[in-house]
């Protein structure tokens, strides 16, 4: 099984990263998606919350689950399982972005932004679809710029999704007891 996952990781990374350094605009766009798109997504959540009467609940669900996924769960997994980033171990890689030398598994960005997107989806399906698409685009871009493997992104996405669902369930339970 490990060999199959390793082959998937390598083949997926090679396929996506092979597009880097082919077009200057595409490189710029993917660097933007990998590094800056998240700021726009957070601003969008703040705007959604500002327009709603359930501000506190929306922010707790979206930002709370994103922070919990990234700060607690990702770091806990990384503490026990180290996985080097692609540019650290592969010979021929199109490196478009510098990154700290730390474990890549699971992706902290994917965990954070998929938790955020799932929280938005649970509040507003239409906006949630857009957010899930953007989180996926960010994950793809992080492979493109060479800071993550495909399985890093997949694991981070699942972790973020599960964290948001867990926080949503806990919030519903807590709010029912409060009433």
Image (cartoon, rainbow, N blue to C red):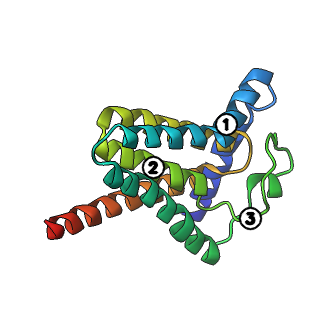
- Foreground mark, 3 or 2? 2
Does residue 119 appear to the left or right of 29 in the view shown? Answer: left
Question: Tag 2 or tag 3, which sits nearer the N-term?
Answer: 3
Q: Nearer the viewer, residue 126 or 155?
A: 126
| Dot 1 crowding, Cα within 10 Å, few <14, some 14–19, many 20+ | some
Q: Position of residue 111 (x, y in %)?
A: 52, 55
Q: Which mark is residue 102?
A: 3
Q: Nearer the viewer, residue 141 or 62?
A: 62
Residue named by callout 2: 116
Distance from label 1 to label 3 (Cα)?
21 Å
Q: Secondary structure at mark 2?
A: helix
**CB contact under 8 Å: marks 1 and 2:** no
Residue 107 in sight in this render: no
Q: Residue at x 76, y 32 (%)?
A: 20
Residue named by callout 1: 16
Does residue 4 appear to the left or right of 47 in the view shown? Answer: right
Q: Which mark is residue 30?
A: none
Q: Position of residue 94 (x, y in %)?
A: 81, 39
Q: Secondary structure at mark 3?
A: loop
Report the quarter where the C terminus lies.
Answer: bottom left
Residue 22 in sight in this render: yes
Q: Residue at x 46, y 54 (%)?
A: 63
Instruction: Say which quarter of the image contains residue 13.
Output: top right
Q: Residue at x 61, y 77 (%)?
A: 80
Distance from label 1 to label 2 (Cα)?
24 Å
């Amino acid at each position: 099984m490990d060999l199959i996952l390793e082959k998937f990781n390598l083949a997926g990374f090679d396929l996506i990263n092979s597009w880097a350094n082919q077009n200057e605009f595409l490189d710029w766009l993917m660097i933007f998606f990998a590094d800056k798109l998240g700021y726009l997504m957070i601003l969008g959540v703040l705007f959604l919350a500002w327009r709603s009467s359930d501000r506190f609940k929306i922010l707790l669900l979206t930002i709370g689950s994103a922070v919990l996924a990234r700060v607690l769960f990702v770091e806990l997994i990384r503490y026990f399982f180290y996985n080097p980033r692609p540019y650290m171990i592969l010979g021929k890689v199109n490196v478009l972005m510098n990154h700290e030398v730390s474990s890549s598994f699971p992706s902290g960005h994917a965990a954070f932004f998929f938790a955020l997107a799932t929280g938005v989806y649970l509040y507003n399906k239409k906006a949630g679809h857009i957010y899930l698409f953007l989180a996926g685009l960010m994950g793809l871009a992080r492979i493109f710029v060479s800071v993550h493997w495909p399985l890093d992104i997949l694991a981070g996405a699942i972790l973020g999704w599960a964290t948001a669902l867990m926080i949503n369930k806990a919030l519903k339970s807590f709010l029912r007891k409060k009433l």
